[in-house]
Image (cartoon, rainbow, N blue to C red):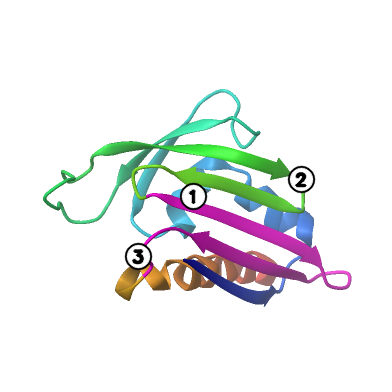
Amino acid sequence: MKVRVKRELLAPPEDVWAFLSEPHNLADWWPGIAAVQPDRRGAARGGRWRLTRSRQPTLFRKPGSGEGLVVTDAQAERRLAFQLPEDRLEVEVNLEPRGHDRTQAEVVVKGPLLLGPRRLVAQQALGRIYDLCQTSADH
């Protein structure tokens, strides 16, 4: 199953990319992440980040449990893609310039059983990216 959402951001692609490509910012825009510990590759293809979850414990996951993220593609100012193996999700964030100071952003989430709250993860992530880029553009 695949969920795709798009939105125009009020910031140039270089500013959006600077935000997305900083691993520690993932906790600000991806739902359920409290902290990120990237390896030395950072947002480069093959990068591996250790994640700390912020959500409530479940039968299979303890609160604050660590898991991994693998960067599968990174093209400056164009695309960041990663896998969340524990959640069985593949995520793409695609950026396209829209004039001097705007960016069309698309978040695509692929995985099994994207139902209920899981179906909203792409929309939540893009909404947070929009809010944070808008706040940056206002200053």
Magenta stretch, main secondary structure class: strand
From this view, report whether residue 86 is shown above or below residue 14: above
Disc 2 designates what residue? 76
Residue type (three-letter) at the residue carrying disc 1: Leu
Residue 9, label in figure: none
**Residue 105 in magenta?**
yes
Rendering coords of residue 67 (x, y %): 33, 37
Residue 16 picture quarter? bottom right
Residue type (three-letter) at the residue carrying disc 3: Leu
- Residue 40 visible at all: yes
Of pointers 3 and 2, the one earlier in the residue sequence: 2
For the record, the magenta segment spans: 88-114
**Could you tell me which secondary element the residue under label 3 belongs to?**
loop
Disc 3 designates what residue? 113
For this orientation, the residue located farthest to the left is: 59
Disc 1 designates what residue? 26
Report, in whole angstroms, how far the alpha carbon at label 3 lies from the one at label 2. Answer: 31 Å
Report, in whole angstroms, how far the alpha carbon at label 3 lies from the one at label 1. Answer: 23 Å
Rendering coords of residue 80 (x, y %): 64, 49
**Residue 97 in magenta?**
yes
Of pointers 3 and 1, the one earlier in the residue sequence: 1
Mark 3 neighbour density, 10 Å: few (under 14) some (14–19) many (20 or more):
few
Tell me, yes or no, whether the two marked residues, 3 and 2, touch with CB atoms within 8 Å. Answer: no
| Closer-to-camera residue (61/54) | 61
